[in-house]
Amino acid sequence: MTTKSESQTRIDGKLRRRVTALAIAAAVGGFLFGFDSSVINGAVDAIEQQFDIQGFLQGFAVAIALIGCAIGAYLAGGLADRFGRRAVMLIGAVLFLVSSLGAGFAFGVWDFMFWRLVGGLGIGVASVIAPTYIAEIVPAAIRGRLASLQQLAITLGIFAALLSDALLAGIGDPDPLRSLLGVEAWRWMFLVGVVPSVVYGYLAWRLPESPRYLLAKDKEDEAREVLATIQPEGEIEDEVRSIRDNIREDEENQRKSSLRGSALGLQPVVWTGLALSIFQQAVGINVIFYYSTTLWSAVGFEDAFLISVITSIVNVAVTFVAIGFVDKVGRRPMLLAGSAGMAISLAAMALAFSQAQLQDEKLTLPEPWGLIALVAANLFVVSFGATWGPLVWVLLGEIFPNRIRATALGVAAAAQWLANFAVTLTFPVLSDFSLTFTYGLYAVFAVLSLAFVFFFVPETKGVKLEDVGGLVFGRAKQT
C-alpha cells in the first residue's frame, strides 16, 4: 500500500524532473550569454593587429558589447511583460545569431563593434529573461538550485568559448590570425556561435509560457495547463488563487508598481538589487575572462590559451558547489564566504604583481610570484564561481515583488552590465598604470561587498516567491 507521503514523493520526483528540464532549456540562454561575452578573449590580440588598434580603442572594442547588454537588459523586462517570456527568448536567439555572423565577417573595426553591440543586446535579454522565467516556473523548495543553472550555463558558455578559441588558434603555437578554410581563425571564433544560437531558438520555441504571465493576461485555461505540468494536482487551485490574489493586489495598489520609493528615489529592494549587480562586477571577475590570455602572455607565461581554458574549467566545476548548497546553506552565508575569499585572493594577486620586473621591455613575474599570481587568480575564480556568480542571479530572480519583477530585474541587470563595461573599458588603462593598484582596487570592492551583504541583504532560502516581498531589504534580516 502506498502512503500519502510516498505518493507525494513519487509525484514530486516526476514534477521535479519536469521543472528541471524546463529550467535547463531556459538556461541555454545563459550558455550563449557566457559564450558571446567571452569569445572575445582569444581574439583580442588578432583584432588589435587586424584593425591596427590599441589602448583605449582596443578596450572599447572589447567592452562595447556590454553597452548592448545594458540596453538589452533594460528593455527585456518591459518586453517580457508585454509579449511574454518565450517571445523575448526568441528575440535574444535571433540577436545572437545575427551578431555571430556579422562579427565573424566584419571588414573593419567599426562594423565589428556594431555587430558586437547587437550581440550585447542578445546577452542583455538572456541575462534578464532566463532568471525571470526560472523563478516563475520553479517551486520554492528547489528554486535556488535550479536558478543556479543560469550561472552554470554561463560558465559552460565561457568554457566552450575559450576552448574553441584555443583549438582554432592552435594549441602549442597559437596564432589567431592563421587561415582556416580561407578565413582567419579569429573570425571562426565568432562564427561558431551560430550553432548554439539556433539551438536556443529551437528550445525557446518549445517552452511553455510562464503561468504568471498568462494569468496576468487573463489566459487562465492556458495557465492551468502549464501548472498541471509543474505543480502537484492538489496544489494547482491554491497556486492559481495565490497568483490571482497577487495580481489583484497589484492592480489595487497601482502606485506601488513603480520602482520609485522614498530611499533616494527608489524602493529599498531596488537599491539592493542594483548594489548586488554592481558589486558582482566591481571585483573584476570579467577581467579574467576577457583579458586573461593577453594578460598571462604579457607577463611571460607560455600556453596562455591553455591557462584560460583551465580557469574556465575551474569556474564550471565550482558552480556545482553553489547548486549543491544554495538551498541547504542559504544565500547570505555563501555570499559572505565568497566576499572574504575574493578579497584575500585579489590581495594576493596585487602583492604578486608588485614584484613584476621589466625584462627586454616585457613584464615578467619572477618565481615564485608567477605561480602565486596564477594560484590566486584561480582561487578568486573559485570564490566567485561558487558564490557571487550564481547567487546574485538567484537573488535577482527572487527579491523583487511580482508587480515589478521583470522591470526591476531589467534595471538591475542593466546596472550590472554598465559596471562590467566600466571595469572592462578601464582595465587596459589601469593595468598600464599599475597591475598592483588595479587588483588592489578590486580587493577593496570585495571587502565592501562583504559589508553590504552583512548589513543589507536578508535570507530568502525556502521563501515562496509571493512572500519574499515581506522580507526587509535595506537592512539585513535573518530568517
Image (tube, rainbow, N blue to C red):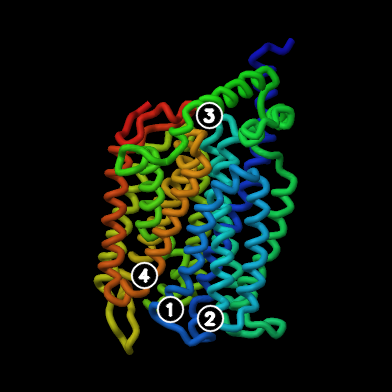
- Tag 1 residue: 57
Report, in whole angstroms, how far the alpha carbon at label 3 lies from the one at label 4. 46 Å
**Left or right, 168 with reference to 228:** left
**How far apart, in angstroms, are the residues tagged by discs 2 and 4?**
20 Å
Q: Of callouts 1 and 3, which one flags the residue occurring earlier in the amino acid sequence?
A: 1
Q: Position of residue 441 (x, y in %)?
A: 27, 61
Q: Give whichever of discs 2 and 4 has the lower sequence position.
A: 2
Disc 4 marks which amino acid? Phe
Q: Is residue 407 left or right of residue 287?
A: right
| Residues at circles 1 and 2 in contact by the CB criterion of under 8 Å | yes
- Badge 3 marks a residue whose secondary structure is helix
Label 1 secondary element: helix
Q: Amino acid at mark 2?
A: Val
Determine which of the numbered discs, if any, sits on residue 337 in the image: none
Three-letter code, disc 1: Leu
Could you say which quadrant of the image residue 454 lies in? top left
Q: Which residue is mark 3?
A: 251
In the rendered image, is residue 208 in sight?
yes
Work out whether 46 lies above or below 6: below
Along the line of sight, the residue nearer the viewer: 148 or 81? 81
**Marks 1 and 4: CB-CB under 8 Å?**
no
Point 46% across, 77% down: residue = 302
Judging by the rendered image, the residue that carries numbered circle 4 is 427
Q: Nearer the viewer, residue 142 or 472?
A: 472
